[in-house]
Image (cartoon, rainbow, N blue to C red):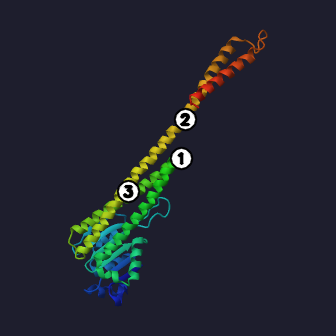
Amino acid sequence: MLQILTNSAETTDASINSLPELAKREDVVIWIDVQAPERSELESISQILGLDQESIEDCLTGEQRPRMDDFDDYAFLLSYGMLGPTDRYDYDPRKLAIYCGKRFIVTVHRETVRAIDMVHRRIDRHQGGLLRGGPGNLLFMILDQMVDNYVLFMDYCETEVDRLEEQSLQDDCDRKILSETSGLRSALAEIRHLAQAVDQAIAAILADDFPFMNDDVEFNFQHVREHLKAVAEFADRLRDRLNSVRDNLAFMIADRTNEIMRVLTVFASILLPLSLVAGIYGMNIPLWPHEEVPHAFGVVLSGMFVLGASLWLFFRRKKWL
């Protein structure tokens, strides 16, 4: 699906057939959004706008690391938008390729990207007026919305970390929490790497002198960079908190093991003297009860009971039970 928007009131929604004419007009800013692209579409756009052919391959195949390529009169940016969690820990980064020149911006994505959809809605509300700020301003809006979605996902992760921390302190906590913790740690590591890579790409744009940049846009990009750095730092803090979840689980398992060993040791301590009495008595009396001492068996059993009860009371008094 291909959609072309411009800043001109008479051509707010254009078609691919009108693109060559629009590209020649100095007063028109063009946004070409291509979802689920076909090679023929991208090659046509590339010929009209003079885009690099190798970058077309990056748009169509692979999952490259976020980066910025400098082509003198335009920048090629690879980034990843977030739809947010579709299920627990199922973060869904989706590749977004952006060409940004003096009078055009081209966005290419195989799947729906929430940041693109939200910018489309903003432009619809303003009837294309947002495009009058130029391609640099539109690039800022897309990246800013993308980073806002990063923040939303981080809020979700924080809620999950709170839940896991609370669960790790419960008596019925088991090792299943480790798989959840591991999945969340992987998600946090991925979003941290994405944030840092996008930040480096924006830094490369700011370091160059592209025609779509101006002082206002540079200031806005610095704002996006601050949010990206905050996302990376927040991810680090949440990963540290996940370490405490594993520590809590290890403590709970160790505490349960100690409790089991303590109870078993107490029972063994009670049964040991009883076994000693029974062993000595059994080795020296040939028949139970002996005809000369008919009450001996009952006396021995009573004595063993008293001994066991005394030990049990002693352990209770010591608070070992």
- The location of residue 65, given as percent across then percent down, is 33, 62
What amino acid type should be assigned to the residue bearing mark 2? Answer: Glu
Extreme residue in the top direction: 292
Rounded to the nearest angstrom, the CA distance separating label 2 from label 3 is: 36 Å
Mark 3 vs 1, N-terminal side: 1
- Residue 94 lies left or right of residue 168; in this view the side is left
- The location of residue 104, given as percent across then percent down, is 29, 79
Decide: few, some or many residues near mark 1? Use Cα within 10 Å; few <14, some 14-19, many ≥20: few
Q: Is residue 153 above or below residue 169?
A: below
Observer able to see residue 95 = no
Please give the residue where the numbered disc 1 appears in the rendered image. 170
Mark 2 lies on a secondary structure that is: helix
Mark 2 vs 3, N-terminal side: 3
- The location of residue 54, given as percent across then percent down, is 29, 70
Decide: few, some or many residues near mark 3? Use Cα within 10 Å; few <14, some 14-19, many ≥20: many
Q: Is residue 292 above or below residue 198?
A: above
Identified at 73% across, 16% down, the residue is 299
Identified at 33% across, 70% down, the residue is 57
Query: 111 or 211, which lies in front?
Result: 211
Decide: few, some or many residues near mark 2? Use Cα within 10 Å; few <14, some 14-19, many ≥20: some
Mark 1 lies on a secondary structure that is: loop
- Residue 45 lies left or right of residue 112; in this view the side is left
What amino acid type should be assigned to the residue bearing mark 1? Answer: Gln
Query: 203 or 313, which lies in front?
Result: 313
Q: Are marks 1 and 2 in contact (CB under 8 Å)?
A: no
- Please state, as top left, top right, bottom left or bottom right, where the N terminus lies in the image: bottom left
